[in-house]
Amino acid sequence: MAAPQTPLELFGTDDLVDADDLAIRDTVRRHVEERVRPHLAEWYDAGTLPARELARELGGLGVLGMHLEGYGCAGTSATAYGLACLELEAGDSGLRSLVSVQGSLAMYAIWQHGSEEQRQEWLPRLAAGEAIGCFGLTEADFGSNPAGMRTRAVRDGDDWVLDGTKMWITNGSVADVAVVWARVEDRVRGFVVPTDAPGFSAPAITRKMSLRASVTSELVLDGVRLPGSAVLPGASGLSGPLSCLTEARFGIVFGVLGAARDCLETALDYAGEREIFDRPLAGYQLTQAKLADMTLELGKGMLLALHLGRLKDAGTLRPEQVSLGKLNNVREAIAIARECRTILGAAGITLEHPVMRHANNLESVLTYEGTSEVHQLVIGRALTGHSAFR
Ligand code: TGC
Ligand code: FAD
């Protein structure tokens, strides 16, 4: 019998990727395996993440804001960024979230829409992991529909004064800087808010059953006074924050495949070793049907991700194409995680194996960065020209 192949070796997807991008991927994979994986179950169990320490390490690796140019960022291809997200999420979605929010949301917002002064002040520190960023768009009553936000910024002389509350904000309680979106008269504008500003607080959200190895917080802005220069000059209207979401969603298209790959490889190993009715579980046809179907979905998801990566590297990727990838790959990743759990039987429900941790994490990923329903509606609008959101 030929030596067993991993699911993605069977697809031969590495042959579609540049050597430089593969080398970056391998560096991130090694770091996750050696430095992070040994602690993940413990962090998940405790509901903690040493975000500051990890940010410094990931900054040292050049992963934070890696696809951005200048200001201490690595300037890699978008595909390399996607592959890095995949390896981080093979560890835990919380690790990938830390990096997505830092690089694609907080840093990208400042890089794309910020003033030169804002970029110089924050990007090099964020890239190095010496500072942590968060991105406050969602409010308790306005998740899928951020256009309805109630957080307001008003002018007072040369200053801005911000009032409102954001909800479910990744990195919130550990951030040094928050990019906060607020209503200014009838427009949505973005603000760079140092988290030590008087009136700013970020209580942590606890008792989560998903993304436990991730910091999730509320942001409270109670008369936060900022200089006139705190507004992002390049963003006026909802397209500002939505452009950042497109960046982060792209990373998720790849990222969730890492969680799915880790589940599938775990299930393959387990099925090879587990003896049931006197022979290995891997030798039963029903198990092989599950493994084959999951491999197919993982490989198809990878081909889609690499296709979108190529479009992004060519500068032609459109937001509705990112919705295709986010919808499909998260939906398939969670299905794979749940199916792998069945192969592990009772052993699948503990933190001894990563499968249920990934499955639980993917419940959040299904919801954040646009729920599956939101992405279906984005695709529906692209196909029909009719907006069915309202
Ligand atoms: P709509 O009329 O469609 O658009 C308003 C303006 O924005 C433009 N636009 C986009 N621009 C860039 N990228 C996109 N993806 C864009 N989508 C729309 C659009 O062209 C328009 O521009 P303009 O110049 O004409 O004004 O706006 P809408 O109010 O109908 O909303 C559309 C909808 C529902 C798709 C949008 O609101 C949406 O995506 N909702 C979901 C919200 C969401 O995903 N929130 C995520 C918060 S951050 C997060 O979850 C982080 S999780 C942690 C992690 O990432 O790990
Ligand atoms: P709702 O919008 O209330 O949706 C509830 C249900 O209604 C969903 O099934 C949805 O698909 C459905 N629905 C909505 N609109 C329609 C429609 N038109 N037609 C049919 N069905 C519809 N936000 C940030 O800004 N920054 C962050 O860093 C961040 N991090 C997060 C981390 C975690 C762990 C989680 C769970 C969330 C995070 N979020 C963050 C918030 C996230 O983006 C929102 O939860 C998400 O956008 C959905 O909003 P909601 O939870 O209010 O759900």
Image (spheres, rainbow, N blue to C red):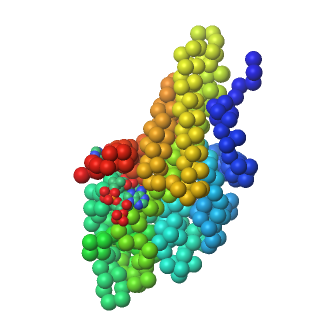
In the displayed structure, 274 sits above or below 248; it is: above
Q: Nearer the viewer, residue 226 or 354?
A: 226
Place of residue 265 in the rendered image (x, y in percent of width and height, measured from the top left) = 62, 32
Q: What residue is at 64 percent from the left and 64 percent from the top?
A: 75
- Quadrant hosting residue 270: top right
Q: Nearer the viewer, residue 61 or 219?
A: 61
Place of residue 32 in the rendered image (x, y in percent of width and height, measured from the top left) = 65, 48
Residue 106 appears in the rendering = yes
In the displayed structure, 82 sits above or below 204; it is: above
Q: Nearer the viewer, residue 66 or 313?
A: 313
Q: Residue furthest left?
A: 390
Q: Please give left or right for residue 157 compared with residue 322 in the image.
A: left
In the displayed structure, 217 sits above or below 18; it is: below
Which quarter shows the N terminus? top right
Q: Residue furthest top?
A: 277
Q: Please give left or right for residue 341 compared with residue 373 in the image.
A: right
In the displayed structure, 135 sits above or below 29; it is: below
Q: What residue is at 45 percent from the left and 38 percent from the top?
A: 331
Q: What residue is at 56 percent from the left and 55 percent from the top?
A: 312
The quadrant of the rendered image in which ligand 1 is seen is bottom left
Q: What residue is at 36 percent from the left and 89 percent from the top?
A: 158
Place of residue 117 in the rendered image (x, y in percent of width and height, measured from the top left) = 53, 81
